[in-house]
Amino acid sequence: MAGTCCAKPITRIIKVAGFEAGIRGLDQALRNVYISGLVHEEEIQRDLLKWIKEFGNYITPSREGDYRKALLREYREYLRTAKHEGKKDGDCSHKR
């Protein structure tokens, strides 16, 4: 179905500092940062956190550091997968 990939963010569960957290829109956030071409880890973490919040996830300020680390770990895994699968599409990127 055309346009369905962007209709509703999917929730994924990831490990964050020893606990499991449901993150809405993680796959879209990873894809959006990948497409943006950022290379510096601080920028990648900042952008991922921004996207995650835009998708409606609440992150307490005291846990932002933990989430940044977990998001960067997920991004690195996404990069490994993207390189193996040859991902270059931007079909689901969103404007801020």
Image (cartoon, rainbow, N blue to C red):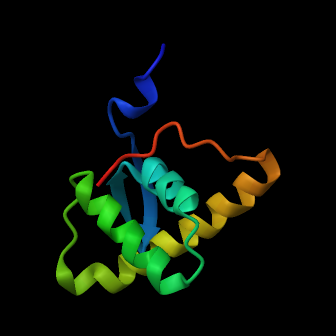
Name the residue rendered at 46%, 85% in the picture.
42
In the rendered image, the vertical position of residue 35 relative to residue 8, given as above or below: below
In the rendered image, the vertical position of residue 15 relative to residue 92, given as above or below: below
Residue found at the very far top of the displayed protein: 1
Q: Is residue 17 visible in this depiction of the protein?
A: no
Quadrant location, the C terminus: bottom left
Q: Is residue 39 left or right of residue 54?
A: right
Q: Residue 94: horizontal and vertical position, in percent?
A: 37, 46
Name the residue rendered at 70%, 46% in the picture.
87
In the rendered image, the vertical position of residue 31 relative to residue 9, given as above or below: below
Q: Residue 2: horizontal and vertical position, in percent?
A: 47, 16
Q: Is residue 2 left or right of residue 49?
A: right
Q: Is residue 84 left or right of residue 15?
A: right
Q: Is residue 66 visible in this depiction of the protein?
A: yes
Which picture quadrant has residue 6?
A: top left
Name the residue rendered at 47%, 39% in the picture.
92
Q: Is residue 13 left or right of residue 80?
A: left
Name the residue rendered at 48%, 54% in the picture.
32
Q: Residue 28: horizontal and vertical position, in percent?
A: 45, 48
